[in-house]
Image (tube, grey):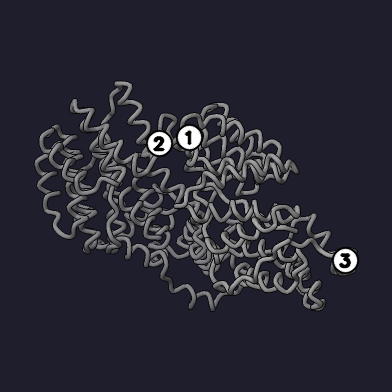
Amino acid sequence: MPAPRRGGALAALALLLAASTAPALAARLPVREVASPQSYEPADSLEGNFLAAYIAGASRDTAAAATFYREAVKGDPRNAELLERSFVALLADGSLPEAFRAAERLTARDGANGLAQLALGVQKIKAKQYAAARQNLQRGGKGAAADLTSTLLTAWSFAGAGEGKKALETINKLKGERYYNVFRDYHAGLIAALVGDKVEAERRLKSAYDSDRNTLRIVDAYGRFEAESGRPDLAVAAYQEFDNVLPRHPIVRDALDKLKAGKPLTPLINSAQEGAAEVLYGLGSAGTSQGDELPAVVYLRLALHLAPEHSLALLTLADTLERMKAPERANEVFARMPANSPLKLNADIQIGLNLEQMGKGDEAIAHLDQVAKTYPNDIDVISALGNVQRSRKKYIESTQTYTKAIDLIGDQPARNYWTLYYFRGTSFERAKEWPKAEADLKKALELVPATQPNGRAQVLNYLAYSWVDQNQNIDEAFRMLKQAVDLQPRDGMIIDSLGWAYYRLGRWDDAVRELEKAIELKPGDPTINDHLGDAYWRAGRRLEGKFQWQHAKDLNPEPEDLTKIEAKLKDGLPELEKPAATADSQPAPQPEMPKGAPAPTEPPAMGTETKSGG
C-alpha cells in the first residue's frame, strides 16, 4: 500500500507517545523507589512505577513500559492520563485484550479519543460486528489521516456485511491529495473483487497500478487479480517490471514461479478483516518509512490482530522492533511467519543474525546451519551463515561456507554476489591464506559495481592495506588507498589504513597527519587510537603517544590487542633495529580531508569487513 504523507493520526499518536508531564513528577520522586525497566520488577509506589514506565517509554522498551504503566494504573485507577498512557503502551507491546479493556474505559470518559475508538472499531471488525465498528470509527477524532483511516475501515465494514454498494460509495467520498486517489482506487479495487464486482475491480486496480507501479502491494494485488481473471500474461508483465526495478523480492519471485508453472494465484484479500488489516498495515508501513517507529508498531499490532498471518505486516513489525534495539522481541515476531509464506526464509535468516547481535553466536550458527540444511540451494541463507561464522572468528569454516554459496551462483550475474568473494577473501586473509585471499579480493574489486562506492572503497582499502602490510605492490597500494579515501572521505577506518601505511613505511609525520584525521572521524575506535599512539611515539611525541595508548586501552580493545597496548604503556616501543620499509616511489602527502562527519553506511545487507592494521 502506498505511504501517505505524515498526517494527523500519525502525528497525534507520536505526540501522545512522546509527550509527558513526567519530568515534573520525577523531580519529586525518591530515586530508590524507581524500578529498573530491565528488571520488570514493579516498584513499591505509584510514583516509582510511573517514572519507571516513563524511562522505559523514552528508551522505547514497550514491554517494560506496558508492565510499569499497568502497575501505575492499579495505584491510581481514576487517573485519565495514566490510563491513556497504559493503553498506548499495551497496544505497542501487543497486549491487545488488555488494551481493548483500557480503550473501553477511556471512551467512557472521553468519547472523542480517536485512538481508543479506532482500537475498539478494530476489535469489532474482528468480531464481525460491523455496525458497532462503524459507530466507534465515526466517533473518533477528525483530521486528514484520521478521516482517511476511518473512511477506509468504514468501507471495509460495509464490505464485511455484504453491502458492497455502500462500501464503494463510502470509499468514493475520499477526496484530497494525489495519494488519496491511489489509496481510494487500491482499496476500492480490493473491495470490488471481494464482493464479486469484477468489472469495477479491474478498473480500480488498473488505475492504482497505472498510478504507482513501484509499490509491491499494488503490483501484487493487480497481478493476482489479472491472473485469477484469466490474464496471466498481464500478471507476468506487472511482476517482471517490478522485478527489473527491485530484483529478487521473494513475493515477486514466488508469484512469477507459480505463473510460469501454470499454478493459480490466490487473491490478495479474502475477507473484510484482511482488508481492514491492509489499511492498518499501510499506516504502519508509512510510519516506519517516516521514522515514527512507535506509532508504526501500534498500527502494525492492530493489523496483525485482524490478520495474524499478514506476512508483510509481520516483517515490517519485526524490522521496526530491530530499529528500536529490541532484537529479542523482533525474533518473536519473525518466528510467527507462516511456514508457507515466501518471506519465511528471510525471517529465519534474520532470526539467526539477531541471535548473533544478541551475543548468542553459537545459537545463531546452529540455527542458520539448520536453515541451510532445509534450503541447501539458497545463496542468501548460506552466505548469512558464513557471515556469522566470520563474525565469530571461525575463519576456516566461513571460507568453506562462502565457497558453497559461490558454487551456487551458476549463470546468475556474478556482480550481484561480489560480497561473497570479498568476505571469503577477508576470511582467507584472517586464516593466513594470503594467496587465496588476494585472488578473492581482486575478484571482488573486478565485480563490485561503480554504483556501490561504499563497497568499492572497502575492497580497495582491504586489498591495499594487506599489500602494504606485507611490503608488496607499494605504489599500487597507495594509489588504491587514496582512491578509497576519495570514495569515502569520511570513513575513519579507511583513513586509518592510509595513515598506518605511512607508518609502516617510516613516514611518521605523514602517518600522524592521517591518523589524526581518522581519530576525529572515529574517536571511539581502539585500533585507531592505538595506531595514533604508535605514530606519536615514533615522531618523538612520546607523552602524547602514551596518552593515546591509555585511551585505546580504555575503549575495550580485543584481548590480543590489549596485551600489546599494556606492554607499550609499560615499556614504550622498541628502538628500530633497521629502517622501516620504503617505497621506490613514495606518494605526496594527502590533501586535507573533511573532518567531523559521521561514519558511512555499510554495504547493503551484508555488513562490512574493514581492514585496519595493528
- Where, by quadrant of the figure, is residue 382 drawn? top right
The residue under label 2 is: 250
In this rendering, is residue 277 above or below 528? above
- Between the C-alphas of marks 2 and 3, the distance is 58 Å
Labels 2, 3: front one: 3
Label pair 2/3, CB-CB below 8 angstroms: no
The residue under label 3 is: 576
Residue 519 in view here: no
Q: Going from the N terminus, do you reach mark 2 or mark 1 first?
A: 2
- Between the C-alphas of marks 2 and 1, the distance is 9 Å
Return the x and y of residue 91 as percentages of the image width and height.
40, 53
Q: Residue at the far front: name it.
A: 584
- Name the kind of residue labelled 3 in the image: Leu
Return the x and y of residue 343 as percentages of the image width and height.
43, 36
Q: Residues within 10 Å of mark 1 (few under 14, many from 20)?
A: many
Q: Residues within 10 Å of mark 2 (few under 14, many from 20)?
A: some
Labels 1, 3: front one: 3
